[in-house]
Image (tube, rainbow, N blue to C red):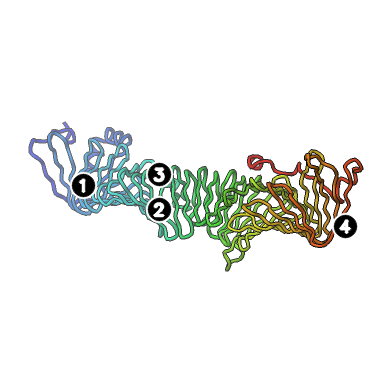
Amino acid sequence: MSLCQAPLHATVFIIFVHVRFLVHFLFSFFLLFCFTPILSFTQEKKEVEIINADYLKFQEVNGKKFTRLVGNVQLKQEGVYMWCDSATLDKETNSVDAWGHIHIQQDTVHAYSNILHHDGNRKFSTLTGNARITDSRMILYTNQLFYDIKNKTAFYLDSGRVVKDSTLITSRKGYYYNNTGDVYFNKEVNITDPNYTLTSDTLRYSVQTKISTFYGNTEIVNKESRIYCNNGWFDSEKDISSFGKNTVVINSPQRIDADSIYYERFRGFGKAVSHFIWSDTSMGTEIHGNYGEFYDEQQYIVATQKPLLIYKMEKDSLFLTADTLKSHNKSAADSTKVFYAYHKVRMYMKEMQGVCDSLFYSFEDSTFRMFYKPVLWSSDIQMSGDTIYLLTKEKRAEKLSIYNAGFIISPAGKKYFDQVKGVNIFGYFTNNELSRLDVEGNAESLYFGKDDKDKYIGNNKALSSTMIMHFKEKKISRIVFVKKPEAVFTPLKMLTPEMMQLKDFNWQIDRKPKSREELMQ
C-alpha cells in the first residue's frame, strides 16, 4: 500500500512546516506515486492550489480531511488569486473557508470581505462582512456578496450600494456583470448625484458609459424640475435623457404629461413625441399636441401636429387649434407670458367663436390679436375686418376692436341680414355677451324693418360718419346715428338682389367652429 493510500490514525497527525517547502515536497511525492489518478482528478475539478502560507496544518475531523492554513495565505484556481489571514481547504469538496482580509483577484476585478466561502467546483464565492467588489471603474459595497467567478458576475440580495465617481446608487438587490460593465438594481433603487436624485423599481447602470436605464415607477429630481415615468434612460455623462409612456415633467408652474420625451439638460432643450399635454397653472393654460419642442430658457414651447390650446376663462374655456402653437416668456428678464398661433387658427367658446390665419396673445394686456382674414362670431353675429383685437379682463371678454374694413352681419331672417360696416368698429361686452358696437369712419348700415305683425316690410340703408348699435338677447335692438344720416327706406317688394347686401358682404358661417369637440378631433 502506498503512503498516499494509507489510512490516518484516529488522532490528528500535525505537521508545521513552511508551505513553500511542503508544496515542493508534496508535488514531487504525488508525481512519484500517484501521477496518473491525481492529474486526471485535477483536470476535472480544477482544484484550488496553495501558493503560500506561514503555517500549514493537516486535520481530520469525523473522517473528513482538511488543510488548515494560517498567515499570509495565498490560493489560486486557474487565473483567480485569493488572499486571506487564515483558511481551511477541503480537497474532497474542492472548497475553501477563509477569514480576515479576504481579497480575490480575477483580471482587473478585485473583491474583498471579512469572511469567504469558495466552491471551487462551481467557481462560486460567497463573501460576507464589509464585502465589496471593484473593476477600477466603480466600487460595489454590501454585507454579503455572491461572486460567480466563472461568468464574472456578482450579486447581492439584501441591500448594497455602488459608487462611481460622485454618483451613489443603492438598492435592495443588485447584479454586476463584469464583461459588459453593467449593474442591475432592483427594489428601492436610489441614485444620488450632485446634479440630481433618482428613485426607481428597477434600474440598469453602465459603469462604462454612465447611462442609467430604468423600468417601473421612477422619479428624477433636480434643481429645476421633477420627473415621473415608467421607463427610460439617462446619460449622466452627456446630460441627456429619454422617457417613455406616462411621463410627467414638472417645472413649476409648468408641467408636461407625455407618452415620450427626449431631453438635453445641458442646453435645456427637450421634445415630446406622440401625445403630450403641456400646462401652466399661472396662466390656466394647456397645450395638447402630438409633437412639441421646449426650452427651459424663457419657458419656451412650440407644438405641432394637431395642437390644441385650452385657456380657462371665467365660467368657460377657450379651445383653440392651429398648425403651430407657441408660448414663451416675453424676455429673459421679463416672465410675462406671450402666446402665438399661426396658420388655420380656429377658436371656440360658448359665447364666441373665431377663425384667422395667425393670432398673438399677451398676458401683459390680456388681449387676443387676430390677423389675416379674421372673423369672430358672438351667437349668430359675425364680425370681420383686416385685424381684430379682443381684450379680456379677469378672463372675460371686455372690448372688441376691429381695424380697417370692419363688417358686422346679423341674420334677420331666413334670407335677410342686418349689416353694418365702417373703417373701425369697437365693441363692448356685458357678462361675456356683446352689448354695444361703435362704428367709426364711413359708417354704413342696412337694417331690415318689421311691421306690427312682426313681418318684414323692407330695409333701411343709412350712411353716417359714426353710428352706435345696441344688442339685446344677442340681436340688434336699435341703431343710433351720432350725426344725421343719409337714409333711404326701400319696401320689400322693390328690393333687388343688389339692394339686399352692402358692398363686400361675405357671410362665412361655414368657417365657424361648431363645438369644442370638433376642434379636439
The answer to which of marks 1 and 2 sits earlier in the sequence is 1
The answer for how far apart the CA atoms under marks 3 and 2 are is: 12 Å
Q: Is residue 397 left or right of residue 79?
A: right
The answer for how far apart the CA atoms under marks 1 and 2 are is: 37 Å
Tell me if label 4 and label 3 are in contact, CB under 8 Å: no
Tell me if label 4 and label 2 are in contact, CB under 8 Å: no
Seen from the viewer's position, the closer of residues 162 and 335 is: 335
Q: Which mark is residue 456?
A: none
Which amino acid, by three-letter code, is at mark 1? Ala
Which amino acid, by three-letter code, is at mark 3? Asp
Q: Is residue 360 visible in the rendered structure shown here?
A: no
Relative image position of residue 374 (x, y in whole percent): 75, 52
Split into 4 quadrants, where in the image is the C terminus? top right
Which amino acid, by three-letter code, is at mark 4? Glu
Residue identifier under label 4: 486
Q: Which mark is residue 201?
A: 3
Split into 4 quadrants, where in the image is the N terminus? top left
- Mark 1 against mark 2, which lies toward the viewer? 2
Which amino acid, by three-letter code, is at mark 2? Ile
Residue identifier under label 1: 87
The answer for how far apart the CA atoms under marks 4 and 2 are is: 81 Å
- The residue depicted at 57 percent of the width and 62 percent of the height is 297
Residue 27 vs 333, above or below: the answer is: above
